[in-house]
Image (cartoon, coloured by chain):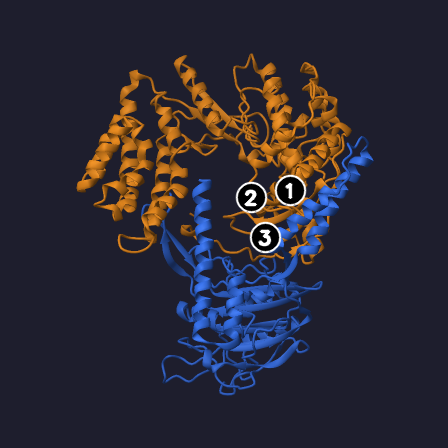
Amino acid sequence: MEWVKGRKLPPCEAIQYNGQPCHTMPELWDALHNTYNSAADRPCDLSVLDELPDLPAWEWASFSALELMEALAACSSLSSPGPDHVTWVHLKKIVAEPQCLNVFIKLANACLTVGRWPKHFKESVSVIIPKPGKPSYSAPKAFRPIALLNTLGKLIEKMLSNRIQHDMIAYNIVDPNQFGGIRQRSTEDAGLYLTHLIRTGWARGLKTSVIAFDIAQFFPSINHDALMAILRKQGFPPLVVNFFASYLVGRSTSYTWNTFVSDLRLADVGVGKGSALSPVLSALFIAPIMKLFKLRAIRLGSTLLSYVDDGTAVLFAALGLVLEHNKTELFHFDRSHSDHNPPLDLGYTPYMGNRLLTPKTYWRYLAFYFDRKLLFTEHVRYYATKSFSTVQAMGMLSNSTRGLPPLEKHLLYRACVQVLYSPPRLTTGIRWIWWIPVDFWWIQQDYIMVIKRLQIYSVDSVDFWWIVVDFWWTSGGLLVDMVDFWWILNYGGLLVDCWWISGGSGGSVVDSGGFLVDSQL
Amino acid sequence: MEGDLAQPNVSAVRVFSQNVAKNALHVDALLSELRNKFDVIFLQEPPWRAIRRVPSTTNRQGDEIVGAPKHPDWLTVVRPPTNDEALRVLAYVHNRLTRLRPSLRRDLIDHRDILILSLFSEGRTINIMNVYSDDQHTAINLLAERAPTLPACILMTGDFNCHSREWDPSVPHHRTTAISLLDTAARLGLELTLPVNPGPTFLSHNVELRGSVIDLVFIKASESLVQPCRLLEWQGPSDHIPLASKFSLPSELEDFKRVSIAKGSDVETQFVEQLIGGIRSIRLETPTTIAEVDAMAQAVADVFSKAWSDNATEKRITRRSEPWWNDTCSETLLQYWDDKTPENWSTFRKATRAAKRKFFDAKIKEIAKTN
């Protein structure tokens, strides 16, 4: 809940770029434009791709009306329109007319068969917004652009993206270790896979270390020639490759900052921001790196795991990508009792000689907090405190006599707290404890204690009382409210006992609570 | 000088300056009372304190929120203090000056006693300065040192804590600090301008002590519109009397307008109908060449842009616009303005309540559905 957080000062400093203040609007637009498109024209060496085999090209079928309707149905009616002001809501009303739908399908298919992406679909508005929590707003890097494209173009992109998503898996283009930008692979999978790797290592008596890289400005630094070469290599039909040749060039955007609007500027770098195809294209771009790494690293015994851009330096450089070295992280997974946590010499600047890369005590990766022994105490503690503080803040909104009615409290709770600690955040931790082998039952016990203490006593008891306080004597209404707490019960008998105690001091609460427990188990 | 109503177009900037002696309540009062009377408020010794605790992910007791009073109409321009030192200068800029991009110039001087604010108008930069000089004359000495590197200013005002017979007839001397201050001002292209109603600006809470003049206004002679004046009625609980000054802008500021189509309005229905009609009329042939694809996309784009320009209306957006306000509210309000009967007032109230209920019910439903 945004309103309980500390207040942010509005950005009030003069913007400087390369040490020069930007006083006039054109200077300011130049500064912003150059910052967001800084990755242009990096050299790249495509010979690295020769090691990979060429995949055979497959067939391409034209788009159907159903595909368009499905892609459109998934669009939020709340998102802002592009420069033509036509929102998804308007578009949904237009395609309800079969004749209009026909026009759009014909246009979408023609774009691909002819290999042309019309100018109208390449125009966008980039709204500049400040990134939250920066100490100073005097550099353009403290702001981020949100690109708004024309919705009709975006719809066709989405249809194409859905197709590629399917083909990527069907024709085995992406590596199973790649998680970003691919449907049905989430951060949770990446986390689980990593835990699996570590545990198999431990079972063989090995220790696992992780080096995490960050690629600077990933989307804008995707090289067009390299991308085209990769697409051809991956067996995309020539028609799709032709389409991308037209799709990637000639994009233009106008910037909007406060109430100021800039002229149209050419933004041809990388893949377009805000486009539905960008995640897919980036996934396709990373895929050969993963495959090459696999080929070269078989004898090294290491694995490369990637989630969009958190993913070996030589390969990246060959394709024109630059690693942001100050974000490189090292972490050792070790379940022995020793405190041995050695730093590492990576063999290239800035981590060479006497400046070594030092490992961390906790490692934050994709919103999980990993600790060295994979106990996830830090993870649970973080998210439990977060949801606890949210619940505490909700207490300001009402008490037993005035303020929000229980129904609305319930809604608010579902909207703000459950997303924090229900799947996949806190429960990810819970699910992972079942990875702990039965031989180590005491660890399991410990872990359950942690969850009990944090989750039941802090979050749910507070929250539970807060919501049901008005229904104190009415067991019928209470049931409706408590349906939401059922998932706690699903996590084993131990937790249910605990929950009984927390809900057991009020007369009717026990009855209905008991009933609920029976019905759930 | 003051009391004029909110002007639709701004052609001059009115500046209010006072040492508020860290009184938060007084600042709150100033912010709401001076909304329509001033465009820039310069404060010396402003309050900067813990406001409340907020739930945190690291601390059970909650994190403290520290800051100065805020007001939706004013942009707070501040260099956040570091290492627990007190904040000395603060500025509020009214939202009607947003088009001038008010910016804090930490690249010129990054010091807790001096705040340089730049306004950008038609390629010209207007620099105004808020100064608090302590009893060690830190700010005056720093300004004297930095003056050669600073750009020309239009206004410099604040609490200088410096006595001289030049501005206070009851003081017999004119010492080095005062000479240095006048010298610096001259380098920046500014002139000392005494208020229209001269008198002490600092009245100690100890009534036995004599008042003195230590708050000064330096202004560029060619830009000054009215002589500064002391505003005795706005003194509040502070021991300093506020000063008001005014300078002109190179060009008039126009109000910001945006063209839009209201969600769920009749105009929107009309807009969608026009879109459907337009797209239906596009000739349905499968394009086979690049030119044909371009032509078809252009035809669609033309339908979109024509429907937009035919239906969109200009709308002034203010900070006080309510998201739930609808046409019924406007109609009933106009009716009430016509005859001012209590019956019409109650219909207006009913209309606003119904509008609010409808708006928030929809919002709640939307949140419930999407989560």
Q: Amino acid at mark 3?
A: Ser
Whole-percent x, y for residue B226 in the image:
61, 81
Which numbered disc, 1 or 3, marks the residue closer to the eye?
1
The spot of residue B285 in percent (x, y) is: 78, 34
| Element at label 1 | helix
Chain letter, disc 3 residue: A
Horizontally, is B231 left or right of A205 in the view? right
Could you tell me how far apart the alpha carbons at marks 1 and 2 are, in whole angstroms?
14 Å
**Residue B92 visible (yes or no):** no
The quarter in which the C terminus of chain B is drawn is top left
Residue under label 3, please give it: A138
Q: Which residue is mark 1?
A: A94
Q: Earlier in the sequence, mark 1 or mark 3?
A: 1
Name the spot of residue A441 as percent of width and height, x first: 28, 20
Which quadrant holds the N terminus of chain B?
bottom right
Which one is in front, B101 or B262?
B262
Q: Answer yes or no: do the residues labelled 1 and 2 have beta carbons within 8 Å?
A: no
Q: What letter labels the chain drawn in blue?
A: B
